Amino acid sequence: MNEKLKELDRNREDSTDQFLTTNQGLRVSDDQNSLKAGSRGPTLLEDFILREKITHFDHERIPERVVHARGVAAHGIFEAYDSNTDLSRAHFLQPGVKTPVFTRFSTVAGSRGSTDLARDVRGFAVKFYTEEGVFDLVGNNMPVFFIQDAIKFPDLIHAVKPEPNNEIPQAASAHDTFWDFISVTPESMHMIMWVMSDRAIPRSLRMMEGFGVHTFRLINKEGKARFVKFHWKPMLGVHSVVWDEAQLISGRDPDFHRRDLWDAIENGDFAEWELGVQVVEEEDEHKFDFDLLDSTKLIPEELVPVVPLGKMTLNRNPDNYFAETEQVAFHLGHLVPGIDFTNDPLLQGRLFSYTDTQLKRLGGPNFHEIPINRSVAPVHNNQRDGHMRQEINKGQTSYSPNKIAGGCPFQAGQDMSGFTSYAERVDGQKIRERSESFVDHYNQAKLFWNSQSDTEKTHIVKALRFELGKVKMEDIRKRMLVQLVQVDQTLANLVAQGLGLDLPSSKDVQLNLGVPADADPAKYQSKPARDDVGSSQALSIESHPGKQGIKTRQVAVLAADGVKAADLKAMKDALTAEGAMVKLIAPRLGMLKPDSGEAMKIDGSLQTEASVLYDAVYVPGGKASADALLQESDAIRFVREAFQHCKPIAASGEGVELLKTTASSGAEKLLESDGVVTSTETGGSDLPEKFIKAMKQHRFWSREKSLV
Ligand code: HDE
């Protein structure tokens, strides 16, 4: 048990074998009937037990987060690698140091009760409980952001949230106000490419990258500072679902990601990421064709590779959602010596917002005392009082300097882990202006587009057709086409075709309405993307390393009574040996009678399960089983959907008949499709091996119509 978990024990409550009491510790003999004047008479005001219970209930809700309201979190540990000691003096980055963490993932736009599978950015916020105080790395699963300056954040969020007159739509960017804003905010185009890509619909929170987004500084023991970009790389690789699947999951299981993380941790399949940094020497600050302070830009990994610093393992689910996941309060300004900020104007604005929002959400200045937010490093200062103060500060003084308390608490010098801000030289006129080095909005959008495989490009085009297709005002669609032309002609063309619109003829249009009243618009106008921006492999999911394994992948086995036990056993054993999770799904719940041997427990019925909740499907042999499934339209839909979503499918013996029935254009064609593996023989068959090989590929995009 790590330091933080031990510390949380102070606040854990367990009612096992205990009496029911009021909040004052009074044992209650009847918690089911209120105190009345006669058994059919009015309830008495005197009933303090009723009043306490109802009052507490009435006050249970707190405001949800204004963004990132829907989230899920887990405890874990971060262990620093033995390398790179020279980069930062932060204690938690020193070789072998293990630090407790609490990590919260979230969607951005939806309310607390919205679906996990919205097309959206995912928050990736990690709280490190270090020996030198709390350090929060509050990132996203995309390395860039929509806007360059924090002052635009309320506008962006107002545009993407449900529209204010009718509060429609929930957890979706596919509506007029979002695209109206984007169509006149060209700096968002790089981020738009990410959000329209499959990165916005992850297969699992355990299978997505994380990014600190802004450029930060690491400072070593000698005081040498370097610029860095933080990266989290998932050990399971990066995987996504397809958009049709995402929409279906939202109905079948809106808690899909939350459940996936919870179940994996409960099963002992701990989620792991490697933390790394891209390092830029101070003297190289201006050697790029973009500004390191501009959060709409990334540093291509081909230019600056990611250096691994350590590994995070999430290995324990919270005990209580509200106490931990809801009340955790992240803030970029929770910092430790050895790490510091830059002047990125998005970062600087965030430094104000996070504490401010906690004051509203958690109700006062003592939110750092809530157990999940408490530092494991001791806290001593002269801050006092406020709502719900927990700490009982002893002594006569609450000010500094003092003599009465011998000057305590003392200030700490750098040699005592005292924090000092990096002494960056700053010199400038006080001015509301965007740096000219920020005025390039399309080159990296094109870099992203160029780096995608044809399948990934097809998905981006389809996403834009969907999103803009949901927009009602045609002039917004047209303005978006003008924006897309600046990025790439083919992309714009394909989107225009889907919208039934002509492509705008000129690239030279004034697009940016975010120009200050007295400024020269030309100074704010980005040029279209250059033709020679090239590509970067790290930006494509398909070329991402770590695709090999099938560990924790969910496999549905469709069967009914009479299923061939030998088929099922051979497949189950092989898949389980590779770490996959096998679920037996039948027309009904209860026990399944195979053709031989013992009855088997059914994990789910065709009514409770759906193919979109699984990564792959297997239909074993056995005539009675196959015949029974052929009578079930849900079984046929199960396989058909898995095929449409390009998933691996296997069948043996009579199970192949079910596959044939699901074919929409010829059974033979289906059986020959990539990722469909079948076998007529039982025992000694190499079907499990072939199926595992197929599953390692994740998806078979050749089944999908390519648009590019
Ligand atoms: Fe946030 N953001 N943000 N954000 N953000 C919040 O803080 C804000 C931005 C991110 O799991 C809020 O406690 C401003 C970028 C995550 O609890 C709020 C700006 C990135 C989370 C806030 C940004 C993020 C938040 C709402 C523009 C990626 C969830 C509730 C300058 C690097 C943390 C809260 C959790 C949450 C403000 C932009 C990540 C209102 C003003 C860029 C992961 O303070």
Image (tube, rainbow, N blue to C red):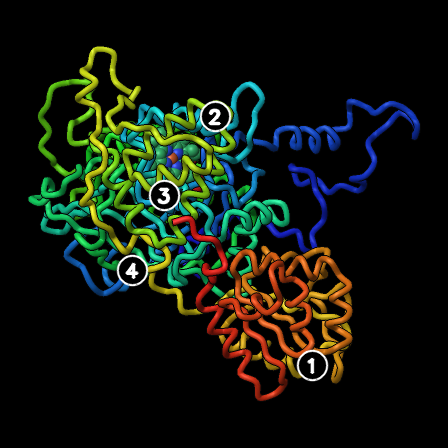
Cα–Cα span, label 3 and label 2: 20 Å
Label pair 1/4, CB-CB below 8 angstroms: no
The foreground one among 129 and 312 is: 312
Occupied quadrant, residue 432: top left
Say whether disc 1 or disc 4 marks the residue closer to the N-terminus. 4
Occupied quadrant, residue 2: bottom left
Is the residue marked 4 within 8 Å of ligand 1, measured from its CB? no
According to the picture, the residue beneath numbered tag 1 turns out to be 565
Occupied quadrant, residue 191: top left
Task: Tell me, for residue 176, which label it has, or none.
Answer: 2
Report helix, strand or loop for mark 3. helix
Name the residue: 60% across, 81% down: 570
Q: In the image, residue 527 lies at what x, y percent? A: 20, 30
According to the picture, the residue beneath numbered tag 4 turns out to be 310
Cα–Cα span, label 3 and label 1: 46 Å
Cα–Cα span, label 4 and label 3: 26 Å
Say whether disc 3 or disc 2 marks the residue closer to the N-terminus. 2
**Quarter of the rendered structure image containing ligand 1:** top left
Q: In the image, residue 284 lies at what x, y percent? A: 9, 45
